Image (cartoon, helix red, strand yellow):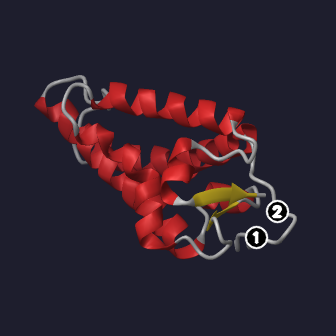
Amino acid sequence: MTLPEPPRLDTGATGAGLGRRFAARLLDVLLVFLPVSLLLAIAGLPPPTFGLGGTEAWTHSAVTALLWTGFYVMFEGTGGATPGKRLLRLQVVRDDGHDVGIAAALVRNVWLLFGLVPWIGGLLQLAAVIVIAVTIATDGQHRGRHDRLAGTMVTS
């Protein structure tokens, strides 16, 4: 199955709203995170506790944080869209409409690495999600705090 190409930024492009972006993330979870979690469970890692458990639970959170960060940086940095975004015809672009690139994709997704912080990493990630959601919902261009920091936007 070939995924549709996401749209390229044009003069009439608008930022994608919170609902479509949330749906794209949910699709990424269903397409990627659930299978990866199953593989981690088969490998013997305990279930995730979002950095709030002991050493083994933190190990799972750290592996998950690294995998998610790599996933988003690779797909957004090299192709402008994760599988979920691509299915919903969304694309991450730089402010000038050009491809994001690895560096901007890393800045945009660095908050996913908060899971590397033992015990409070999950709380930091939750705080980041709230800030990002509020800023997407209240910004006139639907740009989250992470988009502003990276000089990016998600177009539809």
Q: Quadrant of the N terminus?
A: bottom right
17 left or right of 38 in image: right
Q: Which residue is situated farthest in the right direction here?
A: 12
What is the three-letter code of the residue carrying label 2? Ala
Neighbor class of circle 2 (other Cα within 10 Å; few <14, some 14-19, many 20+) is some
Q: Is residue 56 above or below residue 101?
A: above
The quadrant holding residue 25 is top right
51 left or right of 141 in image: left
Residue 83 locus on image (x, y percent): 61, 61
The residue labelled by disc 2 is 13
Q: Is residue 152 above or below residue 141?
A: below
Q: Is residue 87 above or below residue 144?
A: below
Q: What residue is rendered at 26% in x and 30% in y?
A: 51
Residue 9 locus on image (x, y percent): 76, 70
Q: What residue is rendered at 75% in x and 73% in y?
A: 8
Which sits in the foreground, 83 or 30? 83
Q: What residue is rendered at 48% in x and 52% in y?
A: 149
Marks 1 and 2, how far apart at CA: 6 Å
Badge 1 marks a residue whose secondary structure is: loop
The quadrant holding residue 151 is bottom right
The residue labelled by disc 1 is 9
Neighbor class of circle 1 (other Cα within 10 Å; few <14, some 14-19, many 20+) is many
Badge 2 marks a residue whose secondary structure is: loop
Residue 3 locus on image (x, y percent): 71, 70
What is the three-letter code of the residue carrying label 1? Leu
Tags 1 and 2 touching, CB below 8 Å:
yes
Q: Quadrant of the C terminus?
A: bottom right
